[in-house]
């Protein structure tokens, strides 16, 4: 597979890819003493990729989206291809250690690195905000240069999310105003989603299952974040859908079989893109409707409480869908933006179409190593 083909799939910029390799190289050029992402220096040559877990490999403990580790064949040029491994696969820890050679990784530091990987494995996507947030909430010191989130953007997202938590606290404690210290503390506890005792009044008031309460609050946080992302991405979604609908430029000298294949794949991509986006819209619409009924109209709490109880599954679904959408937009933009009005040569169109088809392929089968190697 050519470098040009792999590059947009692996470059930093997509919420489905954390390119630790390239980001580490950049940091070390700027400062050789930079604190690296993983504690074992060798592990900073890998990439983390969010990908669909094949249905046959799923169980109650395995979400629909898994974390693949990408080990490049050439650590200096990751685009030459590499080997991949799902983090949840049996024997993954041993395989990781063996890849770098016997005794190459410090065992104590490797335990810390595995904890970092497992935290990221608990996210449906690798958005910089979510990554930075999960490490802050776990009090794990990380080099924030790996998370491209400006203070302005961070504050904007945080403000959006915290506003959604305030009505929940007011509903549980009618006598508490939003400016009270107690209200602010509870909002912070919802944000952290770690203190079961502090959240007990909310858990009791909303009749949430005790053993799943923290997961519910954590998942709800994620859904609120993705609803923010949904609002931000709408214009770019329209741009890509419009391009997909207009890719009928005349290409001379193109074999009929190739043209038919491209047109068929374009239809597949359009259908897949619309399906994922419609799922996102449906989730956000249901969430907003149930939220408004409970907290704005004060007409019914049933729908919102049902939404909360099913939030874990919803969180992974919307994260997976938005991850695919954003990955497709990033790859499309990277491969077409330099061309006037995005009218691209035939060979480039074939590459774009093949790449986008891989992103939207069926969840019933795994994304094979061909997609990354």
Image (spheres, rainbow, N blue to C red):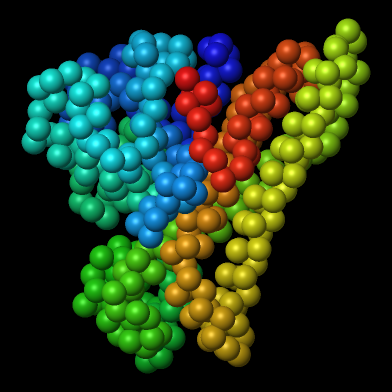
Quarter-of-image position of residue 338: top right
Pick the front one: 269 or 154:
269
x, y percent for residue 293: 60, 82
Residue 110 appears in the rendering: yes
Q: 339 left or right of 148?
A: right
Residue name at image x 27 percent, y 81 percent: 200
Pick the front one: 89 or 342:
89
Q: In the image, is residue 237 above or below residue 1?
A: below
Q: In the image, is residue 13 above or below residue 277?
A: above
Name the residue furthest front: 56
Residue 126 appears in the rendering: no
x, y percent for residue 81: 45, 16
Question: Which image quarter holds the N terminus?
Answer: top right
x, y percent for residue 170: 42, 83
Q: 319 left or right of 212?
A: right
x, y percent for residue 364: 56, 45
Pick the front one: 55 or 19:
55
Residue name at image x 56 percent, y 11 percent: 2
Q: In the image, is residue 285 above or below residue 298?
A: above
Residue name at image x 13 percent, y 20 percent: 102
Residue name at image x 43 percent, y 79 percent: 168
Q: 237 left or right of 287?
A: right
């Amino acid at each position: 597979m050519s470098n040009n083909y792999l590059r947009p799939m692996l470059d930093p910029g997509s919420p489905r890819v954390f390119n630790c390799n390239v980001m580490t190289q950049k940091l070390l050029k700027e400062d050789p003493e930079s604190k690296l992402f993983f504690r074992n220096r060798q592990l900073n040559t890998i990439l983390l990729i969010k990908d669909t877990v094949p249905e046959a490999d799923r169980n109650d403990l395995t979400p629909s989206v898994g974390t693949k580790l990408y080990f490049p064949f050439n650590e200096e040029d990751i685009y030459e291809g590499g080997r991949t491994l799902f983090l949840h696969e049996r024997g993954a820890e041993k395989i990781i250690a063996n890849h770098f050679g016997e005794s190459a990784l410090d065992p104590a530091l490797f335990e810390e690195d595995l904890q970092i990987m497992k935290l990221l494995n608990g996210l449906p996507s690798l958005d910089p905000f979510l990554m930075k947030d999960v490490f802050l909430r776990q009090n794990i010191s990380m080099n924030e240069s790996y998370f491209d989130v400006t203070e302005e953007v961070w504050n904007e997202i945080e403000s959006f999310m915290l506003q959604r938590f305030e009505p929940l606290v007011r509903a549980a404690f009618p006598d508490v105003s939003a400016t009270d210290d107690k209200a602010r503390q509870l909002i912070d506890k919802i944000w952290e989603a770690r203190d079961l005792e502090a959240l007990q009044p909310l858990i009791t008031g909303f009749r949430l299952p005790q053993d799943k309460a923290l997961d519910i609050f954590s998942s709800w946080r994620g859904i609120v974040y993705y609803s923010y992302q949904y609002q931000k991405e709408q214009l770019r979604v329209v741009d890509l859908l419009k391009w997909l609908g207009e890719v009928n430029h005349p290409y001379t000298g193109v074999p009929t079989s190739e043209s038919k294949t491209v047109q068929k794949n374009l239809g597949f991509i359009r259908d897949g893109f619309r399906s994922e986006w419609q799922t996102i819209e449906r989730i956000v619409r249901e969430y907003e409707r149930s939220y408004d009924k409970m907290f704005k109209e004060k007409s019914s709490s049933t729908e919102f409480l049902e939404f909360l109880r099913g939030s874990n599954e919803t969180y992974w679904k919307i994260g997976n869908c938005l991850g695919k959408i954003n990955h497709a937009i990033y790859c499309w933009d990277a491969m077409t933006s330099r061309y006037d009005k995005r009218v691209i040569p035939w060979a480039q169109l074939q590459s774009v179409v093949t790449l986008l088809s891989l992103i939207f392929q069926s969840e019933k089968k795994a994304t094979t190593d061909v997609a990354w190697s």
